Amino acid sequence: MLIIRCHNGRRILPRRVRGMCGIAACVLRNGEVGPVLYDCLKRLEYRGYDSVGEASIIDGKIVVKKDKGKIDQVEEKLGISDLAGVVGIGHTRWATHGAPSQENAHPHTDCKNTVAVVHNGIIENFMRLRQELELKGHQFNSRTDTEVVAHLVEECLGSGKSFAEAVRLTSKKLTGAYALALISSLEPDKVVCVRNESPLVVGRGTDSNYCASDIPAFLSRTNQVIFLEDDEMAVLTADKVRLLHISDGEELTREPVTIDWNAETALKTGYRHFMLKEIHEQPMTVRNALRTHPIYLDLMASAMNRAKRIFLVACGTSYHACLAATYAFSNLAKFAVTPAVASEFIDTYGALVDSDSVVLAVSQSGETADTLSAVRGAKERGATVLGISNVMGSTLTRISDVYIGQNSGPEMGVAATKTFTAQLSVLVKIVVALARKREVLRSADLEALQNGFNRLPGWISIVLSTQEERVKRIVEKYSDRSSFCFLGRGIGVATALEGRLKLLELSYLPAIAYAAGESKHGFISVVEEGYPVIFIAPRDETYSKMIGNTMEMKARGAQIISIVDDQDGEVSGLSDETVTVPPGIPSMLTPIVFVVPLQLFAYYMAVGKGYDPDFPRNLAKSVTVH
Ligand code: AGP
């Protein structure tokens, strides 16, 4: 249990901090920022390691050290820990806009080198802002969304605004998720930082102050933490922290809270395992995936709309995302696509792949050997290759003609969780773009989907906050079982397969998964008194048949554990245990919510059996062999 004590000893339930890149900043009374920022960034490296950079003010000038690569590689090359100065900002990157490169590494500066900025998040309207600034003569050095901030602040400073005010006015022009930290040579004694949706915390020191994406960054220097809310900013000097509202500039006061975490707990931000942390990150990572820029979705939809055949190719959990998306392609875009396990793709469909084919490959790591060789085989046959990956700069993103970074941040747990729900979110977004291009999506369906997309993060949060204890209890009750079977219908088959894979790879139990209708043609012979069958039963077009399947299993003595919505009556009435999700989820989005209780089920079963859910035996996070 996480304990945070306010300075008067009162216990406070912590707000979890989440997100992608790692930003850090500090203002010191004494000493040099280089070693401090280096240490902060090392503690944030699990958030992103494509490129690293620091900036400080030396002799009234902004000095930047940044390059592509991991912290230690850049340290060796540039000696970032030697950076002088008492004010500084730092960044470790997880690329979203602009591939990993020295130019795209943070910090970014303005034309006059009077402002430097580091950023975590996505600035959705950056393209329009950039065009406006370029028309005013601003020169850009990178392809990032972030650089617009430095030039916008430059504009405000140019009109006589103070540094803090320039940052506040700039922030009001931005849309999207952003945590920013900035320095300016015009006011060299302070750091200004801003939070809107992306995480940012302030660390109150005795003769120094800090801000960072996550508490671990500065926990070795201070455990006095001020949590910033959305639409808030802080102005840090060596002995003062000023808090302001961005919208109206009003001053705020907030007491720091005391964090009593050790280093290990800190890396997992209080969770026992990375997997549990990543399961709880899904409201944020799904929101990020849904923020994929329409330009990329349109590029993919156009390529697909020209194709005679579309193949969705992947392995493991990524394949299950493709399988689920297949239902969306046919039901929403009225387009038949072929999902294929990558290791079987060329042998099965190689003869059909040609220049009229599109192969959409999905891989969180972007390095899975089977997926890459399927893609190379498709390329050799003239196909257009599209890619969805969580690792910008990975081989898949380099081979693909068009790719989308799903922006889930590093996934440390071997078992894919947040990357599954993010992949499927991007895939359904692509399907909607294709359906609109083909003019086959009824406006009512489009509206329901748009509404569904907006409510997805909230629905997942509800499941996490209301069902975790119930899942734990069910696991305790069924922890002695030697096998489980997951049954689903329609798009629920993909959810069942994913639930089974999670349990199998983490608890080493020989779990089974089936299309519920198919279970009558074999699996049912396994069912005996007390055999646990897990039903994934959204109230969609398959529901009435699901009731029949539940009764069939019950009649043979099975113990029914069902995942249903909280308005459900019939399947839950037949069940021994139920785990509920909110009602009203569009059927093509159900796997993104219904899978969460199954992820928790597998996690607690593994922990209950004393296994390490982060590093299950015989598995690797990225399988780079055939
Ligand atoms: C899933 O939990 C496993 N880690 C594994 O099945 C994984 O999904 C598969 O190896 C594919 O990995 P990729 O998405 O990185 O290509």
Image: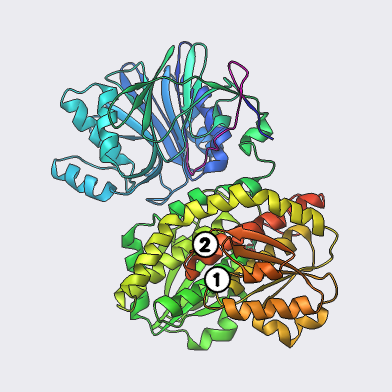
Q: Earlier in the sequence, mark 1 or mark 2?
A: 1
- The one of 556 and 510 positioned closer to us in this rendering: 556
Relative placement, left or right, of 625 versus 476 is left
Quadrant where the C terminus lies?
Answer: bottom right
Residue closest to the eye, 515 or 58: 515
**Residue at coordinates 52% horizontally, 62% vertically from top-left?**
583
Which residue is the site of mark 1?
539
* Looking at the image, residue 246 lies above or below residue 498: above
Residue 489 pos. (x, y %) = 60, 77
Q: Amino acid at mark 1?
A: Arg
Kindly check if marks 1 and 2 are in contact, taking CB atoms under 8 A apart as contact: yes
Give how far apart the Cα atoms at labels 1 and 2 are: 8 Å
Q: Which quadrant does ligand 1 occupy?
A: bottom right
Could you tell me which residue is drawn at 81 percent across and 56 percent down?
A: 477
Which residue is rendered at x = 45% and y = 61% of the image? Answer: 398
- Can you identify the residue that label 2 sits on? 583
Mark 2 lies on a secondary structure that is loop
Q: Which residues are magenta?
A: 5-22
